[in-house]
Amino acid sequence: MTGFATLFTKELLRFWKVAFQTVGGPVLSALLFLVIFAQVLGERVRVFGEVPYTEFLVPGLVMMSVLQNAFANSSSSLIQSKVTGNLVFVLVAPISPFEFFSAYVLASVARGLMVGLGVLAVTVWFVELRVAAPWWALGFALLGAALAGVLGLLAGLWAEKFDQIAAFQSFLVVPLTLLSGVFYSIQSLPERWQAASRLNPFFYMIDGFRYGFFGAADVAPAASLAFVAVSLALVSALTLWLLKKGYKLRT
Amino acid sequence: MTLAVRQGEFFGLLGPNGAGKTTLINIVAGLARASAGSVAVLGADVVADYRRARRMLGVVPQELVFDPFFTVRETLRLQSGYFGIRGNDAWIDEVMHHLDLDAKAQANMRSLSGGMKRRVLVAQALVHKPPVIVLDEPTAGVDVELRQGLWQFVRRLNRDGHTIVLTTHYLEEAEAHCQRIAMLKAGRIVALDTTQNLLASFTGPHPADLEDVFLQLMRKH
């Protein structure tokens, strides 16, 4: 247990020591998105019939930041330790694959939530936000951050170089989160793109999280939550199996 | 290969580059998986009973690796925690003192010289007081002062009952410290005996040192 607690603490310290970059930077990015889109569309567009666009946008931006940062935390930490070689200090210790997994994923969840709260804190100045079903929002934030953290861990295990992680982020995570309905309800899309959106796992996390605020969503929240939970269970099982095998960690 | 290091001995693992010394150490430490066979540390199998095996083992890796986010003291506290030890400052202070690291306790790892980083690596391997200590070329690129200080400390640990396994390319160091030596070539043991017997085995015109024995054996096999 102490091994897990120490690795978890180390992972927290790792991003907290550079919080200006790991928390402050993403909060600023989200704020810029909000300011720009609110300026252009704020008064003109309404979603779900009655929700002003700026208000609609905030939960999406919060969740997008949660997901992107949870992914960034585990993936960048693991690839850094692998490339610089200091992962050896953890690998020679009596830490089980499950402890290793939990420490990395929970630290990712912590960073994701911290950035999410930061985004929420700066955006509430711009909109009066309703919170119709807070437990749904919290459930989606936790499960979504965990899923993104596990995916980051998986990417960190697979990658051997920094640019592979950067590619993973630029060509997969960023497009999937941007196209997940952060900036629009998928009901405003043509039929074909609606169907495509339903294949994007990030869509369910954003849509479900938004339900927590407006009590309205494109998909029933229970179905979205089940989708996220099953995905989390499947990717976790795969990652734990790879960790147990020592995939790309122990030669 | 079949090899048994006795408890409490100072054992040398010698061989040319690529002989398999580091691979062997990596298998013992759990950093690499053996394709066949088994390895145990004081009776604990390094795969089946890895937690117990790793608790009894302290490895000083060959590469100068460090985590740039932390100070020396933080690094040693974290390493203690990985081994399940909290409140280890008294022992950390003692290890830092013996390795002449006291003045650098609050320094960030990034700011240390190569020699100082090497000392921290040794300290990290010792935080959990392992009965078996593996030193993989601990003096590569290290100045005379640190070499002497390091050997003094390692010999003391050996006198206190710690088993030491050493790999080095400086054969005079192995000759000075090791009681028994295994010489490896291409993954096989070509000689395994006490340092004295190995020196006596040399057939040549002049009194031998370990370097002569090493070269003779490597040419023969």
Image: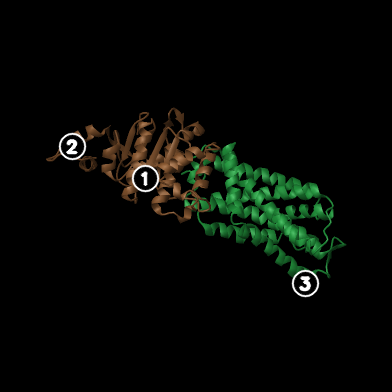
Chain colours: A green, B brown
Q: Amino acid at mark 3?
A: Val
Mark-to-mark CA distance, 2 and 1: 27 Å
Q: Residues within 10 Å of mark 2 (few under 14, many from 20)?
A: some
Which quadrant of the figure has residue B199? top left
Quadrant for the C terminus of chain B, please.
top left
Chain containing the residue with disc 3: A
* Residue for badge 3: A40
B192 or B77: nearer the viewer: B77
Whether labels 3 and 1 share one chain: no
- Left or right of residue B25, residue A180 in this image: right
Secondary structure, mark 3, is helix
Q: Which label's residue is closer to the chain start, 2 or 1?
A: 1
- Left or right of residue B174, residue B205 in this image: left
Residue B207 in view of the camera: yes
Mark-to-mark CA distance, 2 and 3: 87 Å
Chain containing the residue with disc 1: B
In the rendered image of this protein, does residue A69 appear above or below residue B152? below
Point 48% across, 38% down: residue: B91
Mark number, residue B138:
1
Secondary structure, mark 2, is loop
In the rendered image of this protein, does residue A68 appear above or below residue B43? below
Q: Amino acid at mark 2?
A: Phe
Which quadrant of the figure has residue A31? bottom right
Q: Amino acid at mark 1?
A: Pro
Secondary structure, mark 1, is loop
Percent from the top left, x then y, of residue A203? 73, 55
Residue B20 in view of the camera: no
Asked whether the beta carbons under mark 3 and mark 1 sit within 8 Å of each other, the answer is: no
Q: Residue furthest front?
A: B103
* Residue for badge 2: B202
Q: Residue furthest right?
A: A50
Q: Residue furthest top?
A: B43
